[in-house]
């Protein structure tokens, strides 16, 4: 499995608007630079270039790199990729026949923050914009905090 299998192309979407429902957490200071097939986003701080990981399932926001160059190096390390890209889950989904069409990511039917489980029967291909919109609204409603 390659990084291309674990990420999705979102160049057809408005980068400035994609994470609008996460504005309460991001504060307008971040733009997405990479979206994982498992529905998370790596975002770059527009003022200092730090790269952060937006875990949409748990509503968590974690710094992963001080610069795009450091982030690029991390993408070539197995441990980082396994930890942040749900490699096993994506592989299992593909093997089960749940493949992504253009403009889709994998999303939980019943979100984890609402008691949903990370199991194949609860994961469906979903429109990228719909996923980020709904997951951001739910995370805000359940009171996830800034990290």
Image (cartoon, rainbow, N blue to C red):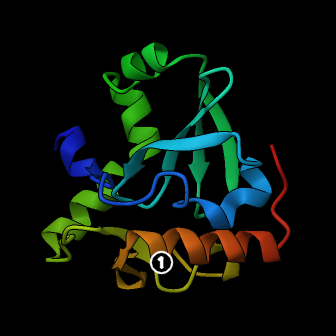
Residues packed near mark 1 inside 10 Å, few (<14), some (14 to 19) or many (20 plus): some
Q: Nearer the viewer, residue 110 or 33?
A: 33
Q: Is residue 75 left or right of residue 102?
A: right
- Going 72% across and 58% down the picture, which residue do you hit? 23
The one nearer the camera, 9 or 100, is 9
Disc 1 marks which residue?
Answer: 130
Give how far across and how far down residue 134 sits, in percent.
Answer: 59, 78
Tell me which residue sits at (62%, 24%) in the image: 50
37 lies left or right of 15: left
Up/down of 84 relative to 110, above or below:
above
The image quadrant that residue 73 belongs to is: top left
Give the residue displayed 24% in from the left and 69% down from the top: 93
Give the image location of residue 74, x and y in percent: 42, 22
Rendering coords of residue 30 (x, y %)? 63, 41
At 33% from the left and 57% from the top, the residue drawn is 37
Count all numbered tags in the image, as a single digit.
Answer: 1
Q: Secondary structure at mark 1?
A: helix
User: Which one is nearer the viewer's eye here, 21 or 101?
Assistant: 21
Place of residue 5 in the rendered image (x, y in percent of width and height, measured from the top left)? 20, 50
Quadrant that contains the N terminus: top left
Q: Is residue 118 visible?
A: no
Please say if 12 is above or below 102: above
Residue 144 visible to an observer of this rendering:
yes
Q: Quadrant of the C terminus?
A: top right
Q: Quadrant of residue 76?
A: top left
Which corner quadrant of the image does residue 135 belong to? bottom right
- Indicate whether 3 appears above or below 139: above
């Amino acid at each position: 499995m390659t990084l291309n299998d674990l990420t999705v192309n979102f160049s057809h979407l408005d980068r400035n608007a994609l994470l609008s429902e996460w504005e309460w957490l991001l504060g307008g200071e971040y733009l997405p630079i990479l979206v994982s097939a498992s529905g998370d986003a790596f975002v770059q701080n527009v003022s200092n270039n730090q790269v952060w990981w937006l875990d949409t399932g748990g509503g968590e926001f974690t710094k992963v790199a001080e610069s795009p160059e450091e982030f690029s190096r991390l993408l070539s390390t197995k441990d980082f990729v396994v930890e942040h890209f749900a490699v096993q889950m994506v592989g299992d989904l593909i093997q089960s026949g749940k493949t992504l069409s253009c403009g889709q990511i994998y999303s939980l039917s019943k979100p984890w923050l609402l008691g949903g489980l990370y199991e194949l029967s609860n994961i469906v291909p979903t429109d990228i914009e719909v996923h980020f919109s709904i997951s951001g609204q739910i995370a805000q409603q359940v009171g996830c905090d800034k990290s």
